[in-house]
Amino acid sequence: MELHEPTEQEQQSALDELTRHMNAVQKRRDSIPSDELQSALETITRALARHWSTGGTRLRRFIWSLWNGWHLVNLSDLCGGLDCELGDAVIVIFHAQMVGALTEDQKRKVLRQSGEFERWESASAETPEGEDVLYPPLSIGTDELCRLAHSATQYARRIATERAAELSRIDDD
């Protein structure tokens, strides 16, 4: 396959396409009214600060998953058991995350002002050396985690075997 130097017209076309894409991304971000997002963040922060040990479990998992990327959040039941105000706040924040309008500073502020960082520090201090801090608490028990770990290990072995076989086929060609 022969490569050619892009013409000026091709370069301009590529730049125009990039500009259209970047404008579409910005339009999606701007589709979240900042006052609506701020209100949702404040609602979640208040709920986590006041009710973190009861109905806030889902909220805690949700906010932490946005912060650390550890997505053990059941989205189909995320708003179950939440009142309309909290459910609507979750929807706004989730939407903002999906379109790139939610910033790391906003997430950090919720976790700090709600007391979640302090609770994580407390859980960390109580966690024995060499163990991962499991905070917020997991929604599944030890038996389920062991089965999941076993399945993940088996899956990793299958993938490694398949990759080795593929590399062997490539080397034979």
Image (tube, rainbow, N blue to C red):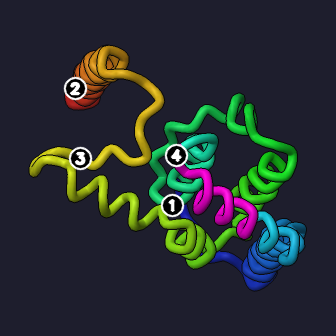
Q: Earlier in the sequence, mark 4 or mark 3?
A: 4
Mark in the foreground, 3 or 2: 3
Which of pointers 4 and 2 lies earlier in the amino acid sequence? 4
Residue at 23% x, 47% y: name it: 132
Q: Which mark is residue 27?
A: none
Question: Mark 1: few, some, or many residues within 10 Å (few <14, many ≥20)?
Answer: some
Point out the frontmost of discs 4 and 1.
4
Circle 4 or circle 2, nearest the eye: 4
Q: Amino acid at mark 3?
A: Asp
Q: Amino acid at mark 1?
A: Trp
Q: Nearer the viewer, mark 1 or mark 2?
A: 1
Q: Which residue is mark 1?
A: 67
Tag 2 or tag 3, which sits nearer the N-term? 3
Return the residue at label 3.
Answer: 132
Q: Are marks 3 and 1 in contact (CB under 8 Å)?
A: no
Residue 78 vs 47, above or below: the answer is above
Residue 13 figure quarter: bottom right
Pointer 1 or 2: first along the chain: 1
Residue at mark 3 to residue at mark 1: CA–CA distance: 17 Å
Q: Amino acid at mark 4?
A: Ser
**Residue assigned mark 4:** 53
Count of marks overlaid on the render: 4
The 10 Å Cα crowd at callout 2, few under 14, some 14 to 19, many 20 or more, is: few
Instruction: Tell me the residue at 75%/40% (across/down).
Output: 82
Mark 3 burial class by Cα count in 10 Å: few <14, some 14-19, many 20+: few
Spot the residue most to the left. 129
Amino acid identity at mark 2: Ala
Q: Which comes before the other along the chain, label 3 or label 1? A: 1
